[in-house]
Amino acid sequence: MAFANLPEFTARQILTAALLNQIITALQGFSTQTADISWPLTAGGNIDMDSQYTIVNMQTLWNITNADEYASLDAAVTAVEATSGGCLFIPPHTTIDGSTGITIDSSNFWIVGCGPTSIIDLSSGTGPLIDTAASLSNVGLMNLQLKNSGATASADAVVFRRTTGARLINVLFTSFLGDSVYFTNDGTAGNSCADAVLQGVEFAGGGTNGIHLRADDLDGCFMDNILSKSALATAISLVPVAASNGIIRDIQMGPNVRVESPAGIGVNILGGAAAADDKWSRISLNGVKVVEPTGDGFNIGEDNLILRNVSMIGCTVDTPGVDAFVVNAQRGQVSNCWSLGSTTKTGLDLVDSVDVSVTNNDLRNFITGIDCSSLPAASSCRVKDNDVRDYVTTAIARPAASVAADTVFSSNTGDFGMSTGNAKIRQDGTGATAETTTTLETYTIPAHTLRKEGDGLHIRAFWRNASGDRAGEMLVHVDAILASTLTLPLGLLGFSDVLVIVNNVGVTGASNTSYSYVSETNGANNAQMGNAAITVDWRADVDITFKVTIAGGTANDAISLQTFLIEGIGGDFGAV
């Protein structure tokens, strides 16, 4: 049996309201031969093409279910699951009561709205608002607001249990008193949540029992454009449930992740044991910002909970309540991070890290800029080109002597030392009179700065005697032991040049045992030059102090050190 009065169509002809109405008329006259038609459209309401060209009072279109046309949220979920998955649609300007909570039992299930006016409200009850059965895949929420207007203090928003491919896209979480998002293995080892994606997610407020984003077993997660505001606990916490029962791996956070004013740690990501393992590895944070946390800004591994392969690039902490950055990692990098901190806290604590490169970070105004004091033997960390100025007690806390040969400190602004090249320091003023010896400059080289044979210092001093050609001397002392005495006729301008070369490095014995030098005079009233080459046995595990002393030759001589230049040879010198 054929249809009567069906319109005829040409290729790519537009389906107008008039043509659609002709089809409807033909269908209304067709009642018995249903086998002649394959009709994928199931409309529970009316197709009204005469007014606004919209579908009204619709329950299901293809595999899209309208939650607003069901008696309860649970009933709408059941309708979606009857087709083994699909899309539950929340219309705009619609609030769906979710006080009884729902459990998603089917894979390939999405709840989709039209933005923050599409709301599911946990108005009462104990939550969670949206729970999932174990071991589902492809479960997602998009373009929604999930809201708590009256649930208990422990009510969670969304719980993913061993879910693969969870997606949260453009979702607003408001005032949940439990965890807003929780990824869990549900107590079963070897069943991680995996391959999650969070994009355009905002967390606002919450309760003292809640964490905005929490995971105890998560193997793969990409996070971008995330905003956490005013968490009343740690904002983001990815912590394995136990050493043998939880994975935190392949976590990529940023760019454009911002955590504001958490009442705890900003970002907390930990390993599961003191020994590094691939189960807790490949953690990447790029452009993540934490503002005014009451705890640490970032806690990326901690004592006995080390991570492996950590990368932190361009992360910032504004006004940390405790330390700005805590990193405990086996292999990784911390670079281009910034914090202007508290004078009672630490900028970066490397804990027990091994083989971590710390470069180009700006960590000023802390009691300790960078704390390396707990690094283990054979740490092989590299701490270079960081700015640790305005510290209160210590610019960079060095490790124990056993780490001396394996840890590199170089060109850190605010830390003692010098870059590869000249670092100029000027001191003007009168010096000794009446042959009284006066020390004009004193410097301390921290332990582990000169670390191998051939490292050294090139010391050059310019000094002036305003009284003309006078006898006098310049002395360079190394660790309070006379290393070089240069006796020169003092001209209008004097110049002394001392080269200190390390002959042997050890951790026991005297600070230096031998030296040699030569001196040269170029004539009165001209630039005077003295040359000294000093070889020393250098203790790598202790600070070494050297000083420059000038003694006047005649009463009332005005001898002053004009410019003092030092250059590091090899070694691990930071910029002055």
Image (spheres, helix red, strand yellow):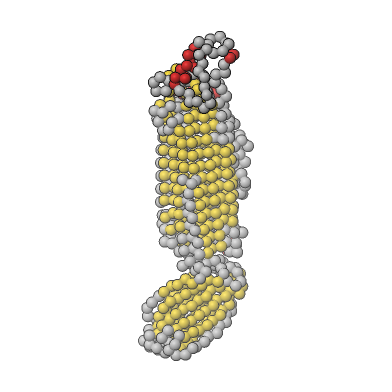
Q: Nearer the viewer, residue 70 or 573?
A: 70
Q: Nearer the viewer, residue 441 or 565?
A: 565
Quarter-wise, where is residue 146 in the image?
A: top left
Q: Residue at x 52, y 79 (%)?
A: 498
Instruction: Name the quadrant of the N terminus.
Output: top right
Quarter-wise, where is residue 455 in the image?
A: bottom right
Toward the top, the furthest residue is 32
Q: Is residue 236 visible?
A: yes
Q: Residue at x 40, y 26 (%)?
A: 94
Q: Nearer the viewer, residue 54 or 379?
A: 54
> Relative to 188, is 13 above or below?
above
Q: Position of residue 136 (x, y in %)?
A: 58, 30
Q: Position of residue 81 (x, y in %)?
A: 55, 23
Q: Position of residue 436 (x, y in %)?
A: 41, 84
Q: Is residue 241 visible?
A: no
Question: Does residue 165 appear left or right of residue 123 in this picture?
Answer: right
Question: Does residue 454 appear left or right of residue 159 in this picture?
Answer: right
Q: Position of residue 379 (x, y in %)?
A: 59, 58
> Relative to 229, is 68 above or below?
above
Q: Residue at x 56, y 80 (%)?
A: 533
Number of on-image labels: 0
Q: Residue at x 50, y 39 (%)?
A: 198
